[in-house]
Image (cartoon, rainbow, N blue to C red):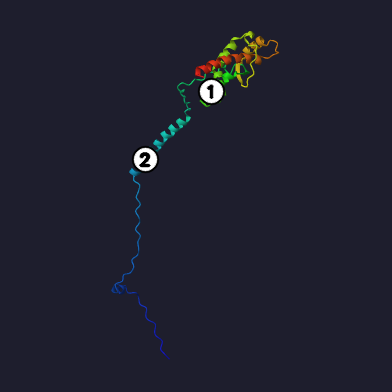
Amino acid sequence: MAKLKLPGRISAPDPGFSRRLEFEAPAELVEDPVPVPLATETETETETETEKAVGSSIAPQSTEAEAVKAAPRRKRSVAPRPGATPAPSRGLRPSGEDMVTIRVLYRLPDDLVARAAAWAEKARCPIGTVLRRAMTELRPELVAALEAGIDYRDIPAERAKQSAHRFDSSITLSRATHARLCAEIDPEGLAGLTPALSRWVRAKVIAHLDKFLTRAGY
């Protein structure tokens, strides 16, 4: 029977053995702490001054923006074109006064309408625009005459000849003037004020429109 091999003897580690074999025991790794730069008093003061400077630069900009928003917008004044006829005032009374608006209907002669149409074609606008401009220019004169008072004998008796061109306009008068005209022109309240005033306005419009078109070269 074979003999058992005796177990080897375990001896204490020899540190010189590793040195003889040119090995060195691994040294313990020591982590060097990363130096954290401390904020100096100078840097803190600089940052504080920078924040103050930024804050002070933003504040005036915000104040200026708020002032611009709060300021009322001004209306641009449009300069009139050279040679353009300014639209006159309509001759109306203040809105606080008790007023009455009368709408008058009338027909215009064909020759005047044809002249107004020639101007409207060149101006590239409807013929009604030309006629309204003439009426706008005449309206203050009509209102002043009616406010001063007209005699019933000033109303034309004849009616207009048949015409395909019928127009209407509005005239605003004070209530006192309206009552005075009713008493003068239609005292019994039978015929009404509008038909008589329409004939009166038509005569005034025809005379003014002829001058208006002649002045414009038509």
Q: Residue at x 37, y 40 (%)?
A: 50
The residue that label 1 is drawn on is 118
Type of the residue with mark 1: Ala
Position of the N terminus by quadrant: bottom left
Q: Residue at x 58, y 14 (%)?
A: 204
Q: Residue at x 57, y 12 (%)?
A: 144
* Position in image of residue 119 (x %, y %): 52, 22
The residue that label 2 is drawn on is 50
Label at residue 194 = none
Q: Residue at x 60, y 14 (%)?
A: 203
Circle 1 residues within 10 Å: few <14, some 14–19, many ≥20: few
Type of the residue with mark 2: Thr
Residue 132 visible to the viewer: no
Q: Is residue 21 depicted above or below 176 in this figure?
A: below
Q: Is residue 147 depicted above or below 14 in this figure?
A: above
Q: Is residue 51 left or right of residue 20?
A: right
Mark 1 or mark 2: whose residue is earlier in sequence: 2
* Position in image of residue 113 (x %, y %): 57, 20
Q: Is residue 40 left or right of residue 138?
A: left
Residue 110 visible to the viewer: yes
SS at circle 1: helix
Q: Compare residues 59 and 195 and report the one nearer the observer.
A: 195
Asked which quadrant contains residue 16, the reply is: bottom left
Marks 1, 2: nearer the viewer: 1
Q: Work out how far the residue at label 1 is from the one at label 2, CA to CA, in angstroms.
A: 74 Å
* Position in image of residue 165 (x %, y %): 61, 21
